[in-house]
Image (cartoon, rainbow, N blue to C red):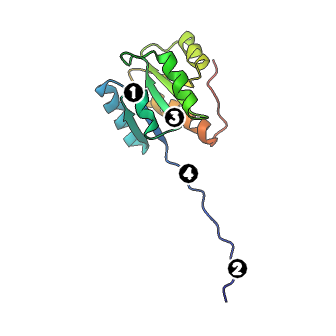
Amino acid sequence: MFSKRTSHIAKVERPLSVLAILASQTDRAQLESIFEKAGWRIVFADGIDDTTIEPMPVVLYDRDLPGADWRQAIRQLAGIQHHRKVILASFVADDYLWEEVIHCGGYDILPKPFRESEVLHVIQFAWASVTKSLPSGQRTR
C-alpha cells in the first residue's frame, strides 16, 4: 500500500533571457560578452519579423536600425506580447527621448556605447518588472 505524501514542487524560474534586435556586430559582441559574464541568455534578431520565432518578455531594439521607424517598432513589439518590456538602445539618451519611448509603449533607454553596469541595471529591472521578482516599475525621473 502506498502512503500519501505531499510532494513539493520547486518553483522553476525562467533564466533571464533577452531578444536583441541590433544591426551592429560590435554592439552584438559587446552584449554577448556582458550577458555571458552575467550568466544570462541573449538571442539576436535582424528585424521585427524575427521576433515571433522565440517570444521573449524583454526586447532590446536599436534606434538606428536601418529602414525602420523605432517608434512604430516599439509599439509593435510591445503589442505582440502582454507585459513585454521593450528597451531602446540609442546613442541619444535624454529625458525627451525617454518620455517618447514610454509614450510609445516602451520601458526604458539603454545608452550606447554599452557600459556593463548600465546594461546590467536596465536589463535586471526590466526582467524583475516582468517576473515581479522585485518591486519595480518603470523608471521615473
Q: Earlier in the sequence, mark 3 or mark 2?
A: 2
Disc tally is: 4
Mark 3 burial class by Cα count in 10 Å: few <14, some 14-19, many 20+ = many
**Residue annotated with mark 3:** 58
On residue 47, the disc is 1
Indicate which label's residue lies in the foreground, 4 or 1: 1
Observer-nearest of 58 and 133: 58
Indicate which label's residue lies in the foreground, 3 or 1: 1
On residue 36, the disc is none
Mark 1 burial class by Cα count in 10 Å: few <14, some 14-19, many 20+ = some
Q: Residue at x 30, y 26 (%)?
A: 26
Mark 1 lies on a secondary structure that is: loop
Find the distance from the CA under tag 4 to the CA under tag 1: 28 Å
The amino acid type found where label 2 is placed reads Lys
**Residue annotated with mark 4:** 13
Instruction: Please provide percent x and percent y for residue 76.
Output: 53, 25
Mark 3 lies on a secondary structure that is: strand
